[in-house]
Image (cartoon, helix red, strand yellow):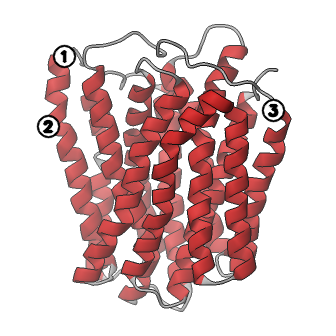
Amino acid sequence: MRPPPIPVLQLLNALVAFGSMFIATQSVSVWRGAGWSAWHISLFMALGNVCYAGLVAQGGRLADRYGRARTGLVGAAIGCLGGLIAMIWREPAAAVVGTMLGFGGPALFFPGCAGLFSDAQGAAGGAPPPLHRKVSGYNLGWALGNFAAFTALGLLGSDPVLSYGVAAAAFFAVGAVLWRWRSLPPLPPPPEGDRAPHPALPRLTMMGRTSLLCACVLVMGMIALCEKALDGDRIAGPVGVERTLASVLLACFSAGYIVTFLILGTWSGWVLRPWRLWACQVGLIAGTAGVLALGRLHLGNAWLLGACGLLIGLSYGATYTGSIFYSLRLPHGAARAASLHETYLGCGYTAGPLLCGLFLSAVGTTLASLGLFLTAVAVVCLGFQAAVIPGAVRLGAR
């Protein structure tokens, strides 16, 4: 039996990302509407991400041992259950359970899907595509799903039952499609990676994963608390507009990394050239500083917030690409490499809401406070890379 075609896998990636992120963002709105503090929102968002970080490493092992399609099918079922629980019980506590399952399911799905993606390209015949193009194709699926989720937050976020139902339906559709490939046998990981070893590769991989962890602290802190910060600042205008502004910020953010994935999938001039990839990430500081400035000036302008989100997203796409690209250059299978990369992502997603919630609880839940936290994390992320890159250059990176 041949693995699913690449366009099908990209669609499945998009649906899982949509379902997971839509459950998470809708839960934030439910918790805010229930009067929960920034600390409580961040705590339970982090709890959901613990499920992702704790399971994603196992997802790669299960995919290689029991079958990638089977593991993905189980992940889709878990995510669907999370959406149904949150939809049926309609309580903030049910939203907590739904968020945990909404993150836990993708932790099993994504490593297996990464392996299927690699298998599908091998089964297609012909010369294998360059690794940077392969990475771009994989990333575009989940990136489009996130964009759809953030956009849907502004359109459907006022109706939690409908929102959770749509998310559950997305997971159900993934399971229905994967059912055809449930008998696909597990494939052993190849003995070597996609490309020949390079002396600077271990250092670049460590830098990429650690930078991704920092960037995910920034991103999930923003996702978890931007709506609460806009609400607490009282700059959003009429009741409910803060959800729309948060949707604009996050949708533009996701659009930014879609653009970056397209560019870095076409242009290979950043490969083993860490300073060039570093330059592609300076928008992290510009975008987060823009959020800080808007908060200080008490400007709840959708266009300006969208521009800040776009800058952050353009740079985050470069950070993410560096981590997954150099992970896949390492000499082990695609599913395991993806699970290691996703583990760093999950740890950052867990720490982000906790650290951001603690900071906002201490200094005030305002857009300016959120911007200050995001800017500080962006400086750490870029500063760490600037300290590590010279060592990679001495090892042969250009």
* Among the two numbered marks 3 and 2 on one chain, the one whose residue lies closer to the N terminus: 3
Q: At 75% from the left edge and 78% from the top edge, which residue is drawn?
A: 88
Report the Cα–Cα distance between label 3 and label 2: 46 Å
Q: Amino acid at mark 3?
A: Trp
Q: At 34% from the left edge and 68% from the top edge, which residue is drawn?
A: 354
In the rendered structure, the answer to whether residue 191 lies left or right of residue 287 reads right
Task: Give the SS element for disc 3.
Answer: helix
Q: Label 1, on which residue?
A: 395
Quadrant of the rendering where the C terminus is positioned: top left
Q: Label 3, on which residue?
A: 181
Q: Is residue 276 visible from the viewing direction of this image?
A: no
Task: Give the SS element for disc 2.
Answer: helix
Q: Label 2, on which residue?
A: 387
Q: Amino acid at mark 1?
A: Leu
Q: Is residue 108 visible from the viewing direction of this image?
A: yes
Image: 57 above or below 226: above
Residue 171 percent location from the top left of the image: 73, 54
Image: 94 above or below 221: below
Q: At 62% from the left edge and 64% from the top edge, which residue is drawn?
A: 22
Mark 3, other Cα within 10 Å: few <14 / some 14–19 / many ≥20: some
Q: Quadrant of residue 81?
A: bottom right
Mark 2, other Cα within 10 Å: few <14 / some 14–19 / many ≥20: few
Mark 1, other Cα within 10 Å: few <14 / some 14–19 / many ≥20: some
Query: 186 or 146: nearer the eye?
Result: 186
Query: 71 or 18: nearer the eye?
Result: 71
